Image: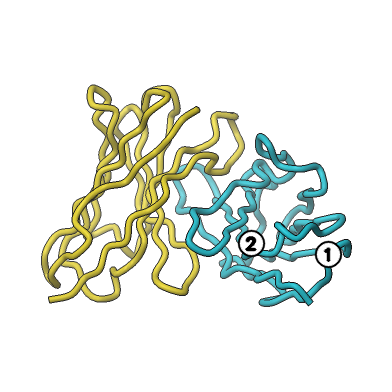
């Protein structure tokens, strides 16, 4: 199980956002990914392998953490960053993937 | 640039079988080892359904394993999803997605736009 917090985060453009993803058991950090989803769109991969930014993702997005606690940090929020964010993990090869329930990042 | 496009009936009757395909363009399904299907019920989060490899092996979410089959047709550059005995709880947007090519890492880097399937009589 992946638990994301907070459920909703209200911030202003220019502020720093820290999103949390906690696993019920230890996860290999390279098996952790983060996605952004806007209404009516498919999810967009932001971070794969725990810390690697996907192609085209701005460097204000960064992923980190280890064991059971992981974070997605957006250093300075832009208007286009307000969306829902999901973490995803796989506990091991050929094991099921699971997603967190999502964090909605809204404009304050 | 790889593109994925899901297609199939938008309405399926309860107890019947949901069948979707995912056409891959701009690349070959055999270029990447694993591909997945993910769904999202209206207003809800993401749910992984299962994955298929270019060797033909597949893994499924335990909650759906008894009803789902995912396959790949390399000659047609297609992925397929079949879900039997559907109920209203299977109403969702269904996405196909490509796994990242970097070994020992995880993430789905290309997604189709999704297709809404409603299970209703």
Q: Position of residue A14 (x, y in %)?
A: 88, 61
The hue used for chain B is: yellow
Horizontal placement of A16 versus A45: left or right?
A: right
Q: Quadrant of residue B10?
A: bottom left
Disc 2 element: strand
Q: Chain of mark 2?
A: A
Q: Position of residue B64 (x, y in %)?
A: 30, 61
Tally of marks: 2
- For this orientation, the residue located farthest to the front is A79
Q: Residue at x 17, y 60 (%)?
A: B84
Q: Who is closer to the viewer here, A99 or A68? A: A99
Residue B11: mark in rendering: none
Q: Position of residue A93 (x, y in %)?
A: 50, 42
Horizontal placement of A58 versus B85: left or right?
A: right
Q: Residue at x 19, y 52 (%)?
A: B19
Q: Quadrant of the C terminus of chain B?
A: bottom left
Name the residue carrying label 1: A13
Spatial separation of the CA atoms under disc 2 and disc 1: 17 Å
The hue used for chain A is: cyan
């Amino acid at each position: 199980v992946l638990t994301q917090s907070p459920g909703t985060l209200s911030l202003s453009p220019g502020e720093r956002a820290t999103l949390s993803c906690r696993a019920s058991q230890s996860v290999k950090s390279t098996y952790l990914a983060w996605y952004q989803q806007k209404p009516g769109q498919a999810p967009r991969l932001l971070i794969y392998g725990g810390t690697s930014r996907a192609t085209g993702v701005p460097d204000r997005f960064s992923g980190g953490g280890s064991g059971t606690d992981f974070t997605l940090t957006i250093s300075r929020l832009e208007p286009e960053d307000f969306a829902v964010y999901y973490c995803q993990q796989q506990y091991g090869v050929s094991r099921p993937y699971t997603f967190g329930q999502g964090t909605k990042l809204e404009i304050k | 640039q790889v593109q994925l496009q899901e297609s199939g009936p938008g309405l399926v009757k309860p107890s019947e079988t949901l069948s979707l395909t995912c056409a891959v363009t701009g690349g070959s399904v055999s270029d990447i080892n694993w591909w997945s299907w993910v769904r999202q019920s209206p207003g809800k989060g993401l749910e992984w359904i299962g994955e298929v490899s270019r060797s033909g092996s597949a893994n499924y979410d335990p909650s759906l394993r008894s009803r789902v089959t995912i396959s790949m047709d390399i000659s047609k550059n297609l992925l397929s999803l079949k879900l039997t005995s559907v109920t209203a709880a299977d109403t969702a947007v269904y996405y196909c997605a490509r796994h990242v090519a970097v070994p020992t890492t995880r993430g789905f880097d290309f997604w189709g736009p999704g297709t809404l399937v409603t299970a209703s009589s």
